[in-house]
Structure formats: structure tokens, C-alpha cells
Image (cartoon, rainbow, N blue to C red):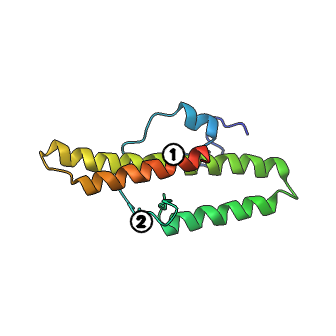
Amino acid sequence: MVMSDANEPGQDPQNPPEAVLTTAALANAQPDTERPAEARSFAAPGEAGAAPLLNAEESGELHARWDSIQAGFVDEPRTAVEQADALVASAMKRLAEVFAEERSRLEEQWGKGGDVSTEDLRLALQRYRSFFGRLLSV
């Protein structure tokens, strides 16, 4: 997929189309610290210690997008792979944002001289451990 900086005829130059995120672009991107904290819905770890990484709505949306991509593979395999790459990049970016938001929240408490409870820190470490284990499939 080739993207140009030029606007297509009839497009509003003040509102350019959103660039498609790819895993290659994500690997070279700087962290997005401007995004507001929207959802910190980390549940307590279950029996296997696997806490949800995204809230149920975000997770559902990602699953629905995946199902659509997978269904489109038969008719347009190349397009499906490009869309899958963009979806994975988007999910990875969102996960990085979720962890950055949590870290920022803890650092804000530390910066104000506030004491973060050992329990809060334990839960944060469990989320990191759970994610890291899933990432490495251990």
C-alpha cells in the first residue's frame, strides 16, 4: 500500500485522511503521550494470572475487525494481509498506550509525594508479568 502526502481531489486540506498504521511504522514511531487516559479496565488476574489487557468494548471491536479481515481473505488475500498488519499495529499501539497510562498514573502519585500502595504495585507488576508471558507464549 502506497500512501502519498498529497491530498486527493475533493478532500479538505484542513482535514487530511488518517494514515494507515502498519507494524513497520509502529516499530519506528515515538510514544504517543498525548492520548487521554480512557479506560484502565484491568481486571484482577484469573486462575491462570491472565488479566485482560484491554476493556471488553475495545477487545470486542478488535475481534470483530479480525473476523471481518479473516472473512475477506478468500476474495482478497493481499488486502486481508495488509488489513491484518494494520490491525495488529493498532492493537500493539493501544497496548503500549494502556501500559503508558498506568505507568503515568503511578508516576503522578510518586511525583506528588503520594505513597503508592504495595498492593497497587503488585497488581501493576502482575499485569506486566501476564502481558510479558503472553507475548513470549510462556
- When the figure is inspected, residue 45 is found, relative to residue 128, above or below; the finding is below
Task: State the residue in front, 88 or 110.
Answer: 110
- When the figure is inspected, residue 14 is found, relative to residue 2, above or below; the finding is below
Q: Which residue matches tag 2?
A: 43
Q: Is residue 96 left or right of residue 124?
A: right
Residue situated furthest left in the rendering: 113
Query: x, y (%) of residue 96?
Result: 46, 45
Query: x, y (%) of residue 19?
Result: 59, 43
Q: Is residue 14 left or right of residue 21?
A: left
Q: Residue at x 60, y 49 (%)?
A: 11
Q: Earlier in the sequence, mark 1 or mark 2?
A: 2
The N terminus, quarter of image: top right
Marker disc for residue 29: none
Where disc 1 sits, the SS reads: helix
Q: Which residue matches tag 1?
A: 132
- When the figure is inspected, residue 68 is found, relative to residue 138, above or below; the finding is below
Q: Residue at x 56, y 34 (%)?
A: 27
The residue type indicated by label 1 comes to Phe
The picture quadrant where one finds residue 31 is: top left
Q: Residue at x 36, y 45 (%)?
A: 34
Query: x, y (%) of residue 117?
Result: 21, 54
Where disc 2 sits, the SS reads: loop
- Measured in 3D between alpha carbons, the distance from the residue under mark 1 to the one under mark 2, in whole angstroms, is 16 Å
Q: Is residue 123 left or right of residue 134?
A: left
